[in-house]
């Protein structure tokens, strides 16, 4: 029944295989010899199977867990260095015909204010985001064929890319909209999107159907097979994710990795990113109703084990998580975070509007982008506003090839420094700028190739003189 190459959801996410994996991991979670063998394999940075990764996730031996966390940190350093890519979500519309019981935008919620941004309002949001310093957005919209048809999404993407305010520009638009047809994915590709993101929410079919009682999203197979259609439509960077808290985390972890294996087996390229959201409070939503919540320690272990299992896949943590939690978990494998986020429709241009009114979830990390950037640098990270790969056509297997050859270091670090420099000059507070300038000076020496370092240094001077948008 289980077949990673199948295009049928229930065969590549086989319930039997997940249950067998959970039982296998439970039986071997304290098998030191086997755990050592898996850790040795993981050190080669070629990834792990879902069964191997599950054993590491379940492992209860403190010394082995310390090794697992250390290895995750090492792999993160090897592949992503100390860079963290920044992004912000942009909510276009909260009209939705679905009934997702964990989301305040569900169609049955009659008291939440509904809003759909006009193109003029989108332009204002984008200007507000550019004025913060953002270059990379993830647009979000409810599913509503009447209010939010694909034409609306396409027009919105066009508007976003067209706004050039002062030195600002949105250089990459990732899209998080409902599962759709191959034809629509093709249109999104043509509109120049970066990653197509779609969270599975839960891989457990029975729970999935209960959690999505109405609307097109009720169809588990259609939703689960969406990434295959997206890839058929030409989108080769796709982002997976589950909403932790809905189902048992072990089940979700196995499902997530099986989905990644499926994409690799069928399309030759795994997911570009994996997101790890946890359920949060929102209008009409009480997270305690969902009894599969995970604590920060389990969350950190999940992040570490995903990092080890799929080293080439970026991992995203949003402002759903508090500063404290982000501080704890970021080292184990996160490569992208959001900052200064608003989770309501129109929240950037009208910050005085009560965010809670129409937000999709309560933000835990309410700091400004400037504060987040400074905090990252104080922890030794380089906040990066880089969008180079997608703009240089390094997507899908081309990106993975570069990543697997570790050549990405000669691009990512100089790109991070140059985009950080732009940020410091155009948007940062004096204090943030001071810390950033020192960091850039120090990190410049870590660029491996002499020639690249020279060009980067030259470009940094040009940025000071007013030029923008250099990239490797
Ligand atoms: S999760 Fe998405 S599809 Fe579901 S109700 Fe919320 S906006 Fe609609
Ligand atoms: S060079 Fe590519 S992989 Fe590196 S940070 Fe930029 S976009 Fe990401």
Image (cartoon, rainbow, N blue to C red):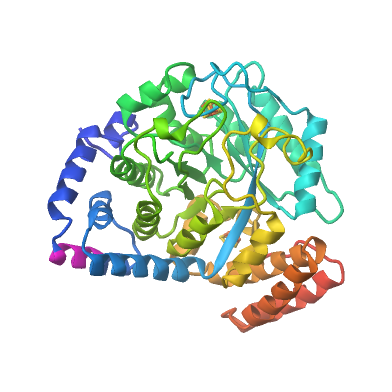
- Residue 351 appears in the picture as rendered: yes
132 in relation to 81, above or below = above
* Near-viewer residue (43 or 393): 43
Where is residue 284 drawn, in percent x and y? 53, 25
Q: Is residue 36 magenta?
A: yes
Where is residue 336 drawn, in percent x and y? 55, 56
Task: Give the image quarter of residue 97.
Answer: top right
Number of on-image labels: 0
- Residue 472 appears in the picture as rendered: no
Q: Looking at the rendering, in which quadrant would you find the N terminus?
A: top left
Task: Give the image quarter of residue 43.
Answer: bottom left
Image position of 151 (left or right of 175): right
Residue at image point 13% right, 61% down: 31
46 in relation to 285, above or below = below
Quarter for ligand 2?
A: bottom right
262 in relation to 316, above or below = above
Image position of 344 (left or right of 25): right
Q: Is residue 383 magenta?
A: no
* Near-viewer residue (459 or 355): 355
Q: In terms of secondary structure, what is the magenta stretch mainly?
A: helix
Task: Give the image quarter of residue 439.
Answer: bottom right
Where is residue 64 drawn, in percent x and y? 24, 67
* Near-viewer residue (80 or 252): 252
Q: Looking at the rendering, in which quadrant would you find the C terminus?
A: bottom right
Residue at image point 68% right, 76% down: 440
Where is residue 381 drawn, in percent x and y? 58, 69
What range of the chain is rendered magenta? 32-38
């Amino acid at each position: 029944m289980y077949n990673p190459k199948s295009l049928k959801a229930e065969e590549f996410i086989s319930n039997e295989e997940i249950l067998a994996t959970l039982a296998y991991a439970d039986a071997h979670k304290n098998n030191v010899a086997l755990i050592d063998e898996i850790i040795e394999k993981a050190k080669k940075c070629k990834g792990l199977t879902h069964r191997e990764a599950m054993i590491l996730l379940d492992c209860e031996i403190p010394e082995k867990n310390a090794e697992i966390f250390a290895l995750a940190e090492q792999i993160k350093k090897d592949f992503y260095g100390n860079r963290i890519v920044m992004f912000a979500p942009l909510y276009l519309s909260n009209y939705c015909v679905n009934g997702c019981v964990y989301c305040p935008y569900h169609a049955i919620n009659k008291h939440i204010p509904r809003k759909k941004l006009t193109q003029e309002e989108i332009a204002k949001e984008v200007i507000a985001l550019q004025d913060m310093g953002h270059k990379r957005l993830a647009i979000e919209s409810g599913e509503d064929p009447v209010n939010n048809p694909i034409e609306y999404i396409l027009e919105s993407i066009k508007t976003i890319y067209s706004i050039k305010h002062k030195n600002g520009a949105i250089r990459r638009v990732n899209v998080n909209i409902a599962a759709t047809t191959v034809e629509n994915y093709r249109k999104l590709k043509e509109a120049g999107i970066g990653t197509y993101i779609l969270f599975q929410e839960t891989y457990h079919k029975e729970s999935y159907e209960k959690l999505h009682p109405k609307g097109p999203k009720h169809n588990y197979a259609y939703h689960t097979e969406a990434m295959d259609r997206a890839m058929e439509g030409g989108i080769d960077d796709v982002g997976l994710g589950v909403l932790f808290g809905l189902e048992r985390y072990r089940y979700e972890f196995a499902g997530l990795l099986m989905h990644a294996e499926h994409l690799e087996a069928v399309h030759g390229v795994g997911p570009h990113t994996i997101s790890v959201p946890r359920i949060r409070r929102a209008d009409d939503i009480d997270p305690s109703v969902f009894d599969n919540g995970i604590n920060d320690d389990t969350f950190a272990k999940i992040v570490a084990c995903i990092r080890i299992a799929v080293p080439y896949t970026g991992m995203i943590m949003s402002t759903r998580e508090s500063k404290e939690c982000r501080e704890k978990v970021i080292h184990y494998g996160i490569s992208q975070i959001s900052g200064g986020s608003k989770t309501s429709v129109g929240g950037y241009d009208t910050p005085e509007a009560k965010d809670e009114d129409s937000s999709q979830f309560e933000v835990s990390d309410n700091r400004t982008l400037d504060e987040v950037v400074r905090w990252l640098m104080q922890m030794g990270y380089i906040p990066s506003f880089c969008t180079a790969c997608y703009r240089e056509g390094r997507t899908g297997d081309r990106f993975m090839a570069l990543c697997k050859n570790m050549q990405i270091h000669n691009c990512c670090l100089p790109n991070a420094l140059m985009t950080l420099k732009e940020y410091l000059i155009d948007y940062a507070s004096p204090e943030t700028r001071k810390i950033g300038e020192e960091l850039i000076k120090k990190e410049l020496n870590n660029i491996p190739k002499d020639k690249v370092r020279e060009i980067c240094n030259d470009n940094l001077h040009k940025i000071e003189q007013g030029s923008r948008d250099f990239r490797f």
